[in-house]
Amino acid sequence: MSHADLALGGHTPAMEPSPFAIPAKKLAMWLFIISDVMTFAACLTAYGFLRNATADWPRPFQSSTVINVMVMTFILVSSSLTMLLGVRAARAGDRSAAFRWTLITLAAGVIFVLLHIRDWAVMIGEGVTLLKNPWGTGLFGGAYFAITGVELLHVIGALIAILIMGLGYRSGRYSAGDLENCGLFWQFINVVWMFVVPLVYLLNVAS
Amino acid sequence: MNAAEKQSGTGRLFVVYFCMLVIPALEVVVAYQHIGGSQKVAAMVSLAIIEALLGVLFFMHLAAEKPKFILFVAVFTLFVLATINYGWTDSFRLLVGAPFAK
C-alpha cells in the first residue's frame, strides 16, 4: 500500500490525472491506432519496394475496377460521416438517433465488404492468384491480396465491434465515450483506405 | 454546445466530407494522365496525405484535442513512418539488377 493510499485512509486508491486530459480508454484506442499504422505502413512500403524493383509489374485495372473502387470509397467516406453523426447524437444523449446512425454505418460497411469481395472474385476469375497471374510477375497477386485482405479483415472486425457497441449503447451497457472510441477505429480504417486506393489501384490502371 | 455552434460544426463536417470525396476524384484524373511514374506517385501520395489529414484532424477530432496530445500522436506516427520508409529507395538498385550498392 502506497503512502498516498495511507494518507487517504487506505480505502481509496491513489488516482493520477488522465494523461493529455483524455479518458484512458480513448488514449488506449489512439495507441492501438498508431500501432496499426505501423502494420499498414509496413505492408504498403513493402509493396512500394516490390513494385518499384520489378520491371514487369502488371497494370491490369480496367475502368470497371476503378469505378467499383470509387463507389467503395464513396460508401466508406459516407459511413465515416454517419458514424460521426451517431457519436454526436450519443454525446447529446439521443440514444435512438445514435443507434440509427450506427445501423446506417453498419449497412454501408456491409455493402463495402460485398463490393470488395466482388472485386476479388473478378480478379480471381481473371486468373490472379497469390503466386501467379496472366500479365506479369507473380508478386502482384500476393501483394494485392495481402494488402486488400488485411484491410478487409480490419473492416470486418470493426463492423463486428460497431454492432456490439451499438447494441450495448442502446441498452445502456456502454457509454457515449465507448461509442466514440469505436468510431475512432472506423475513421482510421477510412484513412487507411485513402492510401490503399491510389497506391494499389490507381497506380496500376491499365493505360 | 448550443444550436448555432452545433450547426457550424455540422456544416464544417459536411465541407470536410465533400473535400474527402473530391480528392479521390482528383486522384483518378491523375491516374489517367500521361506523366512520369515518379510524378504520378508524388501527386497521388500528396493527395492521399491531404485527405488523410482531413480525416484525422476533423473526423477523428484530433484537431480538438490538447496540443500536447496532437504532438504525441504526430511524433510517434511520423517517426515510425520515417523509419519504415528508410530502405525503399534500395529498390532502384534491384531494378537495374546491380547485386551490390555502389
Image (tube, rainbow, N blue to C red):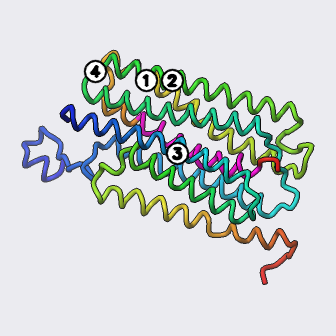
Q: Residue at x 50, y 32 (%)?
A: A78
Tell me which numbered mark, 4 or 3, is placed earlier along the sequence: 4
Badge 1 sits on which subunit? A
Residue A191, numbered label: 3
* Residue in front for this viewpoint, A3 or A115: A115
Which residue type carries mark 2? Answer: Leu
Residue of label 2: A106
**Tag 4 near tag 3, CB within 8 Å:** no
Residue of label 4: A94
Q: Disc 1 to disc 4, how far (Cα)?
A: 12 Å
Secondary element type, mark 1: helix
Which residue type carries mark 3? Answer: Val
Position in image of residue A124 (x %, y %): 83, 33
**Tag 1 near tag 2, CB within 8 Å:** yes
Tell me which numbered mark, 2 or 4, is placed earlier along the sequence: 4
Secondary element type, mark 2: helix
In magenta, the rendered stretch is A182-204
Badge 3 sits on which subunit? A
Position in image of residue A23 (x %, y %): 28, 42
Residue A190 lies in the magenta stretch: yes
Co-location on one chain, circles 3 and 2:
yes
Q: Disc 2 to disc 4, how far (Cα)?
A: 18 Å
Query: Is residue B40 something that shows in the picture?
Result: yes
Q: Residue at x 46, y 27 (%)?
A: A162
Which residue type carries mark 1? Answer: Thr
Residue of label 1: A102
Say left or right for B6 vs B101.
left
Say left or right for A82 vs A148.
left
Secondary element type, mark 4: loop
Q: Disc 1 to disc 3, how far (Cα)?
A: 19 Å
